[in-house]
Amino acid sequence: MPTLTVCLYDGTRQPFRQGNVLLYVRKNDKTLRAQVVDSERVDLILEMEEPRPLAVIASRSGFRQCGVFLPLTKPLPEQVHLMLVPNGESLAFSKDLRKELVDRQPNYQSFLESDPQNAERIEALAKDQSKQLACLLNILEAIRWLPSADSIIPTLEKIQIQIRTNEEEANHVWRGMQQDRAFVVAKDTLVPLLEDTTVFRKETSLLHPLADKGFKEFGRLGEANLNFNVNTASLPADLGPNLVQADIDLDFFDDKLAHISLEVIPNMVTKFFGKPKLTNPAQIFALRWMATKNFQGDLMPVGVTGPRPDFNPLYTITPG
């Protein structure tokens, strides 16, 4: 009988040592095993002839439930890695954030410095609107892991980092950042790059006002997928030649139906009742971290050699 090792982590990417985690294994709609564990590492003996497809799920009071799906189409791994992040989280950013971003990816420098006030605004966001900054950092880190990152990153031309009002959040103004997306100006060469890569497929852009081209990352990670929705036609008169606007975000789910029914519709309903509930970047962080950590195959950020690093958008998640 195969043995599966489950490794538990917290939002700082360190072993989860708070104990009392309910760990359970499900196959289809049946729970095969459930046990409370007090260790950050546990070996599960899978007492079944065909151990997949399985879902391995961890739950603890005060933390968001997390899990990983093990399909039939891939070999059974020896280990799975799960991240438990707290409800009511607090985000802690690297002390020299801009320098670390540029040291890791030099092509981000001109993009982040495209507005002379961006440096000051990044510091302000870290203090007052941490989720907007976390969203941008998730996006920049996810782009860095694309096979075509060396081509896509230089097309990112401008971003206007700003403190946003609640009205701007609700109306999805096409500039700057929100908790669930970043609006950027890019070279028009971005579009053929997205069309030519096998990492993205064309998607409808109907859920992104003004965008006329949509591209969704698919086939690599089951959760926290990158989306580029590009406005090539209804551009501002003062934008400049050979430029487009791009609305970049990360979805919870790769599956389109799951994304619409479990993420888009609930968010739309909360906006209708005047209390918008946007995609939480802390959840995106955890989902993308688990997806890259558990990925079976070749997956590395651009320019990195050696063992696969963690997905690291230069902030950590601690209890609020």
Image (cartoon, rainbow, N blue to C red):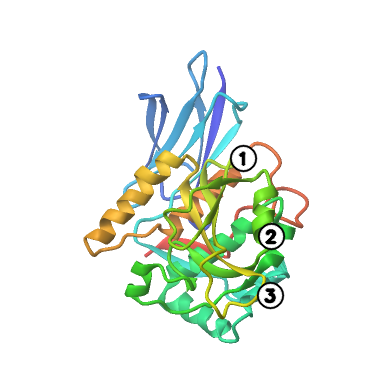
**Structural crowding at the residue carrying mark 1, measured as other residues with C-alpha within 10 Å and reported as few (<14), some (14–19) or many (≥20):** some
Instruction: Please provide percent x and percent y for residue 67.
Output: 45, 39
Instruction: Please provide percent x and percent y for residue 151.
Output: 73, 59
**Structural crowding at the residue carrying mark 2, measured as other residues with C-alpha within 10 Å and reported as few (<14), some (14–19) or many (≥20):** some
Image quadrant of residue 111? bottom right
Image quadrant of residue 107? bottom right
Find disc 1 in the rendering and name its residue: 295
The residue under the point 32% across, 59% down is 277
Task: Name the front one of labels 2 and 3.
Answer: 2
Instruction: Please provide percent x and percent y for residue 186.
Output: 63, 68
Instruction: Please provide percent x and percent y for residue 228.
Output: 55, 56
Say which amino acid is labelled 3: Gln
State if disc 1 and disc 3 touch (CB < 8 Å).
no
The residue under the point 48% across, 56% down is 11
The residue under the point 69% across, 72% down is 102
Task: Name the front one of labels 3 and 1.
Answer: 3
Q: Of marks 3 and 1, which one's residue comes earlier in the chain? A: 3
> SS for tag 1?
loop
Find disc 3 in the rendering and name its residue: 109
The front one of 132 and 191 is 191
Find disc 2 in the rendering and name its residue: 152
Residue at the top extreme, as displayed: 49
Say which amino acid is labelled 2: Ile
> SS for tag 3?
helix
Task: Name the front one of labels 1 and 2.
Answer: 2
The front one of 43 and 270 is 270
**Structural crowding at the residue carrying mark 3, measured as other residues with C-alpha within 10 Å and reported as few (<14), some (14–19) or many (≥20):** some
- Alpha-carbon span between mark 2 and mark 3: 14 Å
Q: Taking 45 as reference, is 301 left or right?
A: right
The quarter of the rendered structure image containing the N terminus is top right
**Taking the image as drawn, is residue 230 in sight?**
yes
